[in-house]
Amino acid sequence: GAGVSQSPSNKVTEKGKDVELRCDPISGHTALYWYRQRLGQGLEFLIYFQGNSAPDKSGLPSDRFSAERTGESVSTLTIQRTQQEDSAVYLCASSLTGGPGYEQFFGPGTRLTVL
Amino acid sequence: KNEVEQSPQNLTAQEGEFITINCSYSVGISALHWLQQHPGGGIVSLFMLSSGKKKHGRLIATINIQEKHSSLHITASHPRDSAVYICAVPYSGGGADGLTFGKGTHLIIQP
């Protein structure tokens, strides 16, 4: 079956605008994760969904960041009033269920550039 | 939050050499992941292990839970192994949550 998909693949926006990034996990995967990778830096955890609920939002860097998931499938990461420091590749991953014993499958990422 | 240290940060070796990448973490865990990030940015899961050793082709991963340490080995390295190798552990040590990552080891294998 298809892997994790993300859209758009690239997004250029102006400082102060809102953006929405989309993730379609592998069908049947109940756990979904958002990460980001800023240029030259390592991956950072943002948020984790089990089903439609997010038991761990501790990685979200500010209240400008929010995420939702509906129907135990698609998830949207929203960044309000974007800042230049939000420029990064945003990666989504999914796994069969949450928990450390399950492999995570990564999407190709959305490259966000805030001008 | 779990802290992850990887070494070396950069490694250049000749084709055929045996490669070792090390990872240590601060909080006890139940599983550790090794990931590979290709030059184009795609990330692939190589191993997930909670004890002992796993082998896949020329790749071997080991973990010592008591010492909070894992190693990734590549035997008979090849230029196509050139990539960034990333160690990751559960963000808060256990349970169902996201991963926290090492800064990665940038490996270049020269022909």
Image: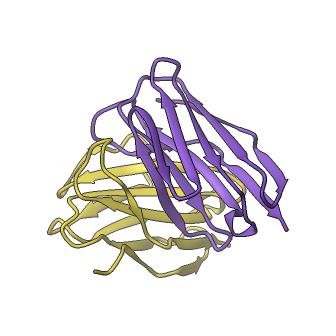
Relative placement, left or right, of A49 versus B98 is: left
Whole-percent x, y for residue A88 in the image: 60, 63
Relative placement, left or right, of B18 versus A51 is: right
Would you place residue B99 above or below residue B13 in this image? above
Q: Quadrant of the N terminus of chain A?
A: bottom left
Furthest toward the left, the residue is A71
Palette colour of chain B? purple
Residue A81, can we see it?
no
Furthest toward the top, the residue is B66
Q: Nearer the viewer, residue B78 or A14?
A: B78
For the point 42% across and 23% down, which residue is it? B28
Would you place residue A75 above or below residue B67 in this image? below
Q: Quadrant of the C terminus of chain A?
A: bottom right
Relative placement, left or right, of B92 versus B86 is: left
Would you place residue B88 above or below residue B69 in this image? below
For the point 45% across and 24% down, which residue is it? B65
Palette colour of chain A? yellow
For the point 37% across and 50% down, which residue is it? A47
For the point 35% across and 31% down, which residue is it? B30
Residue B58, can we see it?
yes
Would you place residue B19 above or below residue B16 in this image? above
Whole-percent x, y for residue B97 in the image: 33, 42
Q: Nearer the viewer, residue A13 or B106?
A: B106
Whole-percent x, y for residue B55 in the image: 48, 49
Quadrant of residue A3 within the rendered picture? bottom left
Q: How many marks?
A: 0
Quadrant of residue A99 within the rendered picture? top left
Q: Nearer the viewer, residue A91 or A66?
A: A91
Q: Nearer the viewer, residue A99 or A10?
A: A99
